[in-house]
Structures are given as C-alpha cells and as structure tokens.
Image (tube, grey):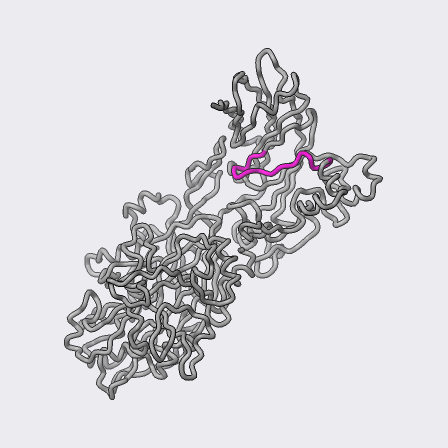
C-alpha cells in the first residue's frame, strides 16, 4: 500500500506572498508520495542521485487575498543565447533576452495563447479573445524551428490547477526569473466578463467595444485590462542532499495578481406577447354578457391564438435579493421576512443587455464568500472578510413588457354597456403553488400562501448561465350558466376545463396555435407543439416552455361588470369572486407587498396555474442549441445536452409538489390525471427577430 507524507508549506504570511520561501522538511524513509498544497510528487522519480543538482519550485497564484487562480501560466524565463540571436529562424520566434523584449508583433514575452482553441469534446473555444503570442500545439509539433525553441526555451513551463497551484520539477538551482501570465477572462469559474470589468472593477468603457461586451484589441499587453504579467527573481535551492537527516527542501513562490476579482453569473432569455388588437374577451352571444365570453379570443380570433400575430418588445426586469449577512439557514427555515429583509438590486450594480425580444443580465455574486486553504479546498469565510470571493446570489426576478414599450391601444366589449380593455401579465421567477393556493389579497392576517409566494427564491452560482421557464397553463370555458359558475371548482369557475390543449382554441385561454390553416402561416415561426386539433393543426399548451417567456394579453372588464355577476376577467389570471371589493384588487394599483419594501402586485398572474422557474443552461448545451436550425425544438434535437433542470412534464425540483400544476404536462396536453406524463423538453429561442442563443453568443458570453 502506498504511503504518503503531507508537507505543509503554508507560512500564514499574507502580506509577503510575492517573496520566495525555502521550506526544509524531515522525510520518512519509506514514503511513496509527497503531498503539498493540492499537489503530489512520487519519490521514485526524484532520488536518482546522492545529491540533487536541481530544485522543485511550487507556488500558488492568488487573488483577493486568498483565492487560488486556475489556468495561470508560469515559466522559468530563459534568455535568448548570443548564438541563437544570430539564427534568424530562432530569433523570429524567440527574440527575448529579457522578459520585456518584444517580438515582431510588438508583444512582450508572455505565455498566453496566440489563438483560441476548440475543445474537441465540448466544442467550447478558449480564450474567447486571444491576445498572446504563445504557439499552439499544432504549430509546435509540425514546425521544427518552433519545436526546437519550445524544447530549449519553454522547457520549464506549466499552468496552475483548479486550486491555483503549480509545480515545476527539475529547475536548475541558483537565481532564476519566474514569469507569470494571466488572462482574467480565462481563469475557469472565476473568469471575468468585459461587462463585469466595467461595472465591478471600474475600468474605463474606452477599453472595450460593442457595449462593453468585448475588449478593445491592442498589441501592447500593458494596454489590455484583462492581461497581467509579472516576473519575480527566486533563489532555487537543491531539492535534496542531506543523507544524514533525511531532509528535503522545496522552494515556494506565490504570485498575487493585482486585479480584484468578482464572481458573476448570467440570466438570459427571450420574451414575447400577443399582437396588436389581440386579447381574451369578446362578445359572441349578441350582448348576453356572459362569464364565458371572457374566455373567448377577440376577433379575429385566429390572430389572437395564432403564432403569426405575436409581438416582441424590450423587457423590464426587477431583481430582488437577500444580502450576505442573512444566512441560508435563516432563509431555509422561513425565519426571514422578504418584505423587510430583501433588497432590490440597483440597475447600476449589474450589466444589462437588451434588444427587442431578448435579454441578458450579468449579475455579481454577493453571498457565501470563500477562501482557498493550504490543501487547495475552498472553505467558507465571513461575508465581511476583506479577503476571498463571493460564490452565490439568492433572490428572485420579475419580468414584464410595459404598455409604454408595446402599446395596447384598443378596447372591446362582451355586450351592451360593457367595456373590455387589455392588460398584460407580469410574472415572478420562480413561483409555484398547489391548486387554489395562489397568493391572495391581503387581509388583517396575511394568507400563508401569499407568504410562501413571496419567499420562493433561487440560489445562483457564480460562473454559470441561467435562463427561465414558464408553464403554459390553459383554462377553457364556454358555459352560459353564470349562476352555477360561482360554485368554484378548486379556485376556478365550476365549468372550467383546465390544462386541456385539445379543446377549441378560440375558447382556451393561453393556448398557442402554431399550425398553418386558412391564410395563417403560423408554422414559419417554428414554435414547438405538444398537441393538435383538427382544423388548426399543431398546438402548444399545458406544458413547460424553456428559454422563451410568453406574456399573454387578457381582457379586463372595466365597465358593466355587474351584468356577468361582477367577473373581471378569465380566471386564468386570478381567482374571481362575486364580491367587487376583492374582485378588482389585482387589476388596479395596490399596496400589497412584494419584497424589499416594494409593493403593488397589479397584473401579477396567479401562482397556482402560471408556474415559473429558473433553469441552468450549460455552455455546451448552448452550443448544441445554436446548431439547431429551427427556433423551436425539443431535447430530441440536442441529444448531447447535459442540463438537468430543464422543465417538462416529468422533472420535479426539490421542494416542489409536482412537475406541473393541475394535471399539466401530459402527453398531447390532455390535462387528464390518468394519462402518461410527457417526457419531452420544449425550447424556443425567440419570436421573429429574437434569438436568445444567438444574442448571448454575440455578447461573447459563450
């Protein structure tokens, strides 16, 4: 059995991390492996002579006073010899007699890649913007001068591991110059985005292009805000040679980079709404003014339900979060009141990218701070410690398309002396509730379901990409017996059929028809389907859609509501009551709390039908989605996808009661409890000119 001996090299000196240290350790004679920091070294390869004429150099590249930085490049700088300076082939590749000398491109000595390389397994290209001059493997192997230069002048070159540690074995003893090259946009999970460098590090926007999404190129590495190089002179000691005391010596040299890193994540997606003159609420019975007419698609009903009539606009977001001093344990046990303890993230504190139909928010982590310990593990530290980096963010987001951005300048009626005006949903992410347990109008003692709605949140992790998902709930009703409708069926009208996509789409609130019929070319927009109906073709409803959020327009009965027993709208939006005092609440400005002393829940859609969630989207999945030519697709089109949180009729997240609300997510969208769940996952990149996958690629986020 192999025996290991750990050598502790941590001196605890955080003020002098750029000074070399020579650590002598008494060695056990029967040890097989030496372990230090996050590294190890087999002894079978090191005791080849009675005295070592070489040393072992180890160290850690640090930022923020104690975080190990991956993928930093380290080398022992070897000056160009006088003989080689006369060789044009060598000199053209390696003109460096000092690290400050420049090559024929005007770039000083560095270890950064000259071009980005694609990982053959993942397809990911790193770095996204290469600025260095170091040759790639193909150039070294296939070009003899490159190979000779590499073997002679780059023989002592390495890069740091995930803990920020490096080791160079066999370094000549004596005084050596140690070089560091770091690109802070290419350091693994702590990689900075150009936008975050402006927002969080205070760099001038003049150093960036394309709305701070790309770094302005320069041949002088000193002009690049993401590049840092250092040289330190180190006295390399002999690794071993004390045969009496069995001691070895290791030279440790740490680097501390000047950049103060912040950890960010991205939320992206697309959003669309109904067309101009489209809403649910239409007179179909000659002025009878029935409740069921609020479930009727406005004429031309084809345009209301058809995909070809939709619109895109600029989304408006609001981000709520828990500050770092509130612990996860306090939040998890429900001991924190979001009304007073959460905060709203100021737009100046995160990077915002929007175009019609698409959005991307780059947000800085602000909780769960960590440091790297001596053996390379991340360990928690106090949120107010000046050292370390935050790794998490916890909160929720709300989205809407305002009427100022996408107007709804029309009205209708459901009979004489009535007036139906359109409104558009707002949604909170995440939200979910069991049937008839949606958030409700406040009372002297607040309803527990409203408290649950307010407390529902998501924990984001730095370095990851997230999008949104929405369940497309359906409510169908064409019954004329208003007196019986108020005998509510679990929070819905008695005559409602919920989450059945096969019902007549002209009466099925929330349905989307994406099949071609008559003169309506709905299919050109590539929206996926999970059901169909004779005469209309493909339909979507009663299931989850990932990436793209639909914000429907419903009719709100503003005048004449007493005729249909004081109904205001289809109960797809909120639970109706005959009592006018309650019934008007979510159709008007109000003082109901959301969080962070923020209030007004007007137009927020009920949480027991309109479920929403946050989904994590791996970078490899985004590349696979980009290769799908259609805007809409399913997981069948991306068989290599590794994302595990995409929503569908099967997956139930931790602490959720079911995969879908009220018998949703069934095959063919039937809404029948005994039918099989639909295992497909549905995705949509964006309506019309919107394409959220292409958008984040254009921003250099993938």
| Outermost residue to the top | 244
Q: Say whether residue 323 is left or right of residue 18.
A: left
Rendered residue at 59%/56% (across/down): 214
Question: Which is more toward the observer, 575 or 224?
Answer: 575
Rendered residue at 69%/30% (across/down): 176
Rendered residue at 33%/57% (across/down): 650
Quadrant for the C terminus, please: bottom right
Q: Quadrant of residue 520?
A: bottom left
Q: Quadrant of residue 425?
A: bottom left
Residue 159 image offset from top left, x and y in percent: 60, 38
Q: Is residue 159 magenta?
A: yes
| Residue 555 in view in this figure | yes
State the count of labels.
0
Rendered residue at 21%/66% (across/down): 491
Q: Say whether residue 594 is left or right of residue 58.
A: left
Q: Which residues are magenta?
A: 152-166
| Outermost residue to the right | 86
Q: Is residue 551 above or below residue 371?
A: below
Q: Is residue 505 magenta?
A: no
| Residue 349 in view in this figure | no
Residue 92 image offset from top left, x and y in percent: 79, 45
Q: Is residue 520 above or below residue 109?
A: below
Q: Quadrant of residue 697?
A: bottom right
Q: Say whether residue 256 is left or right of residue 459.
A: right
Residue 532 image offset from top left, x and y in percent: 35, 73
Question: Which is more toward the observer, 664 or 690?
Answer: 664
Residue 65 image offset from top left, x and y in percent: 52, 37
């Amino acid at each position: 059995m192999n025996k290991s001996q750990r050598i502790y090299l941590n001196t605890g000196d955080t003020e002098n991390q750029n000074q070399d240290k020579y650590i002598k350790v008494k060695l056990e004679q029967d040890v097989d492996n030496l372990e230090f920091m996050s590294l190890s070294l087999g002894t079978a390869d090191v005791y080849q002579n009675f005295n070592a004429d070489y040393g072992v150099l180890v160290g850690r590249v640090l930022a923020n006073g104690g975080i190990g930085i991956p993928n930093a490049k380290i080398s022992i700088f070897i000056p160009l010899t006088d003989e080689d300076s006369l060789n044009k082939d060598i000199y053209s590749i390696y003109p460096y007699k000092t690290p400050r000398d420049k090559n024929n491109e005007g770039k000083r000595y560095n270890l950064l890649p000259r071009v980005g390389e694609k990982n053959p397994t993942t397809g990911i290209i790193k770095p996204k913007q290469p600025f260095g001059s170091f040759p790639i493997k193909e150039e070294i192997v296939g070009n003899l001068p490159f190979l000779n230069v590499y073997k002679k002048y780059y023989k002592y070159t390495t890069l740091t591991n995930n803990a920020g540690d490096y080791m160079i074995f066999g370094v000549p003893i004596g005084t050596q110059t140690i070089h560091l090259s770091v690109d802070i946009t290419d350091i693994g999970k702590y990689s900075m985005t150009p936008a975050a460098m402006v927002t969080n590090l205070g760099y001038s926007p003049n150093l960036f292009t394309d709305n701070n999404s790309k770094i302005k190129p320069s041949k002088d590495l000193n002009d690049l805000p993401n590049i840092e190089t250092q040289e330190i002179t180190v006295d390399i000691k002999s690794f071993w040679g004390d045969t009496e005391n069995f001691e070895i010596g290791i030279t440790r040299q740490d680097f501390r980079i000047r950049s103060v890193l912040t950890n960010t994540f991205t939320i992206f997606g697309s959003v669309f709404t109904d067309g101009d003159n489209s809403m649910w609420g239409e007179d179909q019975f000659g002025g009878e003014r029935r409740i069921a007419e609020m479930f009727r698609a406005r004429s031309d009903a084809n345009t209301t339900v058809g995909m070809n009539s939709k619109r895109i606009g600029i989304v408006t977001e609001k981000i709520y979060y828990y500050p770092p001093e509130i612990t996860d344990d306090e939040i998890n046990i429900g001991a924190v009141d979001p009304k007073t303890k959460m905060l709203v993230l100021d737009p100046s504190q995160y990077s915002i990218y929007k175009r019609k139909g698409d959005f991307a928010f780059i947000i800085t982590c602000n909780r769960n701070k960590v440091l790297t310990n001596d053996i390379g593990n991340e360990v928690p530290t106090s949120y107010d410690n000046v050292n370390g980096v935050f790794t998490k963010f916890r909160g929720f987001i709300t989205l809407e398309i305002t009427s100022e951005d996408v107007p709804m300048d029309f009205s209708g009626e459901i009979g004489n002396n009535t007036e139906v005006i359109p409104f558009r949903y707002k949604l909170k992410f995440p939200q979910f509730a069991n049937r008839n347990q949606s958030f409700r109008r406040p009372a002297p003692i607040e309803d527990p379901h409203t408290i649950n709605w307010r407390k529902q949140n998501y924990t984001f992790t730095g370095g990851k990409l997230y999008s949104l998902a929405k369940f497309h709930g359906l409510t169908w009703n064409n019954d004329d017996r208003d007196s019986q409708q108020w005998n509510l069926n679990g929070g819905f009208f008695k005559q409602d059929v919920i989450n059945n996509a096969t019902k007549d789409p002209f009466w099925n609130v929330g349905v989307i028809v994406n099949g071609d019929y008559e003169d309506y070319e709905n299919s050109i927009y590539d929206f996926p389907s999970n059901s169909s109906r004779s005469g209309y073709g493909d339909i979507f409803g009663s299931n989850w859609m990932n990436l793209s959020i639909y914000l429907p327009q419903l009719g709100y009965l503003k005048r004449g509501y007493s005729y249909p027993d004081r109904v205001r709208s289809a109960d797809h939006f909120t639970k109706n009551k005959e009592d006018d005092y309650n019934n008007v609440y979510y159709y008007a400005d109000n003082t109901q709390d959301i969080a962070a002393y923020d209030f007004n829940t007007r137009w927020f859609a009920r949480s027991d039908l309109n479920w929403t969630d946050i989904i994590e989207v791996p970078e490899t999945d985004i590349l696979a989605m980009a290769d799908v030519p259609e805007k809409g697709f399913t997981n069948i089109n991306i068989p290599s996808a590794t994302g595990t949180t995409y929503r569908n009729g099967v997956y139930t997240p931790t602490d959720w009661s079911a995969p879908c609300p009220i018998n949703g997510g069934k095959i063919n969208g039937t809404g029948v409890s005994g039918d099989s769940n639909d295992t497909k996952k549905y995705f949509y990149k964006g309506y019309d000119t919107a394409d959220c996958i292409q958008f984040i690629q254009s921003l250099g986020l993938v």
